[in-house]
């Protein structure tokens, strides 16, 4: 579970760092999104309005990355700590740790990358679709890791009750 714990802590570092970056560079980030979006959407009937909307949606993706990193990183760590008291084997605990750590970090990175890609692609939907290769497996890792922990907890609790 060491690797999973380190990945979860890296996820928390990402979330906390994004919070700090938002505090220091929010206006610069938003301006960068809008500048790129304006170049991409120059042929739109009202490129300034379209760029402003797109940069706002990109900023929402950045906030999602921050929130997912903090929530998933914390949840993954808590779930791994919970497994330490379970009677399951080390291999199953290690697998759950890998899945939770990879899932938490990968899914948080997905939202951040989507935020940076969207202005150049002209759409957050296109940015998200272009990163499905990252979003889908990492979300599945989170879910599968949680299911494994749930199975371990149920097995341990019902064995103890017998």
Image: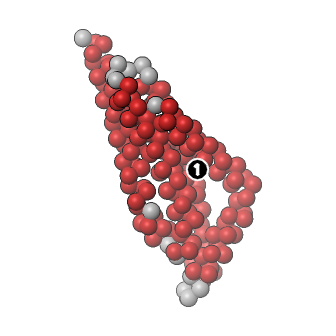
Q: Position of residue 15 (x, y in %)?
A: 60, 46
In this figure, which colouring scheme has been used for the structure? secondary structure
Q: Where is residue 5 in the image (x, y as percent from the top left)?
A: 51, 34
For label 1, the crowd category at 10 Å Cα-Cα, with few meaning under 14, some 14 to 19 and many 20 or more, is many
Vertical arrangement, residue 67 with respect to residue 149, above or below = below
Residue 26, picture quadrant: bottom right
Residue 43, picture quadrant: bottom right
> Which residue is farthest left?
162
Task: Report if residue 158 is visible in the image.
Answer: yes
The residue shown at (52%, 53%) is 109
- Where the C terminus falls, by quadrant? top left
Q: Position of residue 2 (x, y in %)?
A: 50, 31
Residue denoted by label 1: 66
Residue 32, picture quadrant: bottom right
Task: Report if residue 46 is visible in the image.
Answer: no
Circle 1 SS class? helix
> Which residue is farthest top?
162
Vertical arrangement, residue 31 with respect to residue 155, above or below = below
Vertical arrangement, residue 109 with respect to residue 58, above or below = above
The residue shown at (52%, 40%) is 7
Q: How many marks?
A: 1
In the image, is 23 to the left or to the right of 114? right
The residue shown at (45%, 70%) is 126
Q: Where is residue 112 in the image (x, y as percent from the top left)?
A: 55, 57
The residue shown at (49%, 56%) is 110
- Name the residue nearer the viewer: 133 or 42: 133
In the image, is 77 to the left or to the right of 152? right
């Amino acid at each position: 579970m060491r690797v999973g714990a380190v990945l979860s802590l890296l996820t928390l570092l990402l979330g906390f760092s994004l919070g700090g970056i938002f505090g220091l560079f929010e206006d610069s980030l938003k301006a960068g999104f809008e500048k790129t979006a304006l170049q991409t959407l120059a042929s739109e009937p009202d490129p300034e309005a379209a760029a402003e909307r797109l940069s706002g949606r990109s900023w929402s993706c950045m906030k999602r990355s921050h929130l997912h990193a903090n929530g998933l990183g914390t949840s993954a760590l808590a779930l791994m700590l919970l497994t330490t008291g379970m009677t399951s084997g080390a291999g199953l605990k290690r697998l759950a740790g890998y899945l939770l750590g990879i899932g938490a970090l990968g899914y948080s990175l997905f939202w951040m990358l989507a935020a940076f890609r969207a202005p150049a692609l002209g759409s957050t939907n296109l940015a998200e679709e272009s990163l499905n290769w990252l979003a889908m497996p990492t979300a599945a890792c989170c879910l599968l890791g949680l299911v494994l922990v749930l199975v371990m907890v149920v097995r341990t609790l019902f064995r103890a009750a017998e």
